[in-house]
């Protein structure tokens, strides 16, 4: 694990609380997609996706822009319905959830964190974290607030409970968004490019929080352009292009010895961008350190 290299403050990193290698081996499949095909109008976007995620695993989907990564996530939580194929989450046939009540029940179990944080700007951080557990899950306010404070501590924002989103940095808002998702105690969290809109100096703190959730055994599907992060946290990596999974495997294989030329070319380009982003990030951190002297 080299996640410490990504951390803003390495001293804040807490070690994994469970041995994931032992735990996951006996776990059943939580998410499965079988031969999923989806078109928008006449345009085919997913052309036979097969993917599975075991409980407690972190799976990353990488690939060029427009290759269908976000569409796969939106199919998993039933936001869009493919024309063909089967999607199951904890045994539930996602395509068969037709009523609003069925869809809401499914989405209660699947957290979705996006590039945009979508926090309620007129509510405090604490209220952002408690509104859904109280109104959707029927928890008592006291219980929801107790949970919220614990989650804010987990994402290292214990002192921001009474702040408003507009008073926080992008990285802090994204960590509130992650805490809000965790407040629903989801079985599965889908992360779609959650660091893409952030200033370089706040990317590490968000990746670090996600890495710790993965270490805690939270089942995750991550769409990311952060290749070092994907390599570091994932149990399995899927490379998509043109709506198909070109290649998948353990991160050491995908990043170390990809079978497919397309994967190799994509990774070469992505690593160049990663290096540029890291240089930019370290310049920002150095500037920040100078500014605070
Ligand atoms: N609602 C929609 N209507 C029509 N076409 C869509 C819709 N959503 C996505 N598409 C198309 O489907 C294709 C796959 O989109 P998707 O957002 O899944 O790509 P992606 O791999 O997530 O890309 P990026 O890395 O840029 O986020 C693209 O060509 C996109 O234009
Ligand atoms: Mg996308």
Image (tube, rainbow, N blue to C red):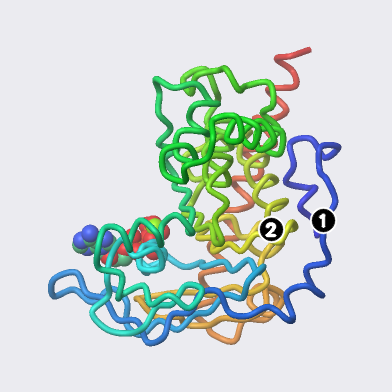
Name the residue nearer the viewer: 84 or 98: 98
Residue 69 rendering spot, x and y as whole percentages: 41, 66
What residue is rendered at 44% in x and 77% in y? 88
Q: Of the two numbered discs 2 and 1 on the same chain, state the one appearing first in sequence.
A: 1
Tag 1, which secondary structure? loop
Q: In this view, does 48 lie to the left or right of 22?
A: left
Indicate whether 110 appears above or below 161: below
Tag 2, which secondary structure? helix
Residue 36 rendering spot, x and y as whole percentages: 35, 81
Indicate whether 276 appears above or below 162: below
The answer, for residue 65, to whether it is visible in the render is: no
Snapshot quadrant of residue 218:
bottom right
Quarter of the figure with the C terminus: top right
The answer, for residue 84, to whether it is visible in the render is: yes
Extreme-left residue of the structure: 42
Residue 158 rendering spot, x and y as whole percentages: 69, 26
What residue is rendered at 26% in x and 58% in y? 100
Name the residue nearer the viewer: 138 or 185: 138
The label shown at residue 44 is none
Name the residue nearer the viewer: 202 or 33: 33
Q: Name the residue under label 2.
A: 214
What residue is rendered at 86% in x and 37% in y? 11
The answer to whether the beta carbon of the residue marked 1 is less than 8 Å from any atom of ligand 2 is no
Residue 57 rendering spot, x and y as whole percentages: 65, 69
Q: Is residue 219 left or right of residue 77?
A: right
Quarter of the figure with the N terminus: bottom right
Q: Name the residue under label 1.
A: 16
What residue is rendered at 33% in x and 63% in y? 102
């Amino acid at each position: 694990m080299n996640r410490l290299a990504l951390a803003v403050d390495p001293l804040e990193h807490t070690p994994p609380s469970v041995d994931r290698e032992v735990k996951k081996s006996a776990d059943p499949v939580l998410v499965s997609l079988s031969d999923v095909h989806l078109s928008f109008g006449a345009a085919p976007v997913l052309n036979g996706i097969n993917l599975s995620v075991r409980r407690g695993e972190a799976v990353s989907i990488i690939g060029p822009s427009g290759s269908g990564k976000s569409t796969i996530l939106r199919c998993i939580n039933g936001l869009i319905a493919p024309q063909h194929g089967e999607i199951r989450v904890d045994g539930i046939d996602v395509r068969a959830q037709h009523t609003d009540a069925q869809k809401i029940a499914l989405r209660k179990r699947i957290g979705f964190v996006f590039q945009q944080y979508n926090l309620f700007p007129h509510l405090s951080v604490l209220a952002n974290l408690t509104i859904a557990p109280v109104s959707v899950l029927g928890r008592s306010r006291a219980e929801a607030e107790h949970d919220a404070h614990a989650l804010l501590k987990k994402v290292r924002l214990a002192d921001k409970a009474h702040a408003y989103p507009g008073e926080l940095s992008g990285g802090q808002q994204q960590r509130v968004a992650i805490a809000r998702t965790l407040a629903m105690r989801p079985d599965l969290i889908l992360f779609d490019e959650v660091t893409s809109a952030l200033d370089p100096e706040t990317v590490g703190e968000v990746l670090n929080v996600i890495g710790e959730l993965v270490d805690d055994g939270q089942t995750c599907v991550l769409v990311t352009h952060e290749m070092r992060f994907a390599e570091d946290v994932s149990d399995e990596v899927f490379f998509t292009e043109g709506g198909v999974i070109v290649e998948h495997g353990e991160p050491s294989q995908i990043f170390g010895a990809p079978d497919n030329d397309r994967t190799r070319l994509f990774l070469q380009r992505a690593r160049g961008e990663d290096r540029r982003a890291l240089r930019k990030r370290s310049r920002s951190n150095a500037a920040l350190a100078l500014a605070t002297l």
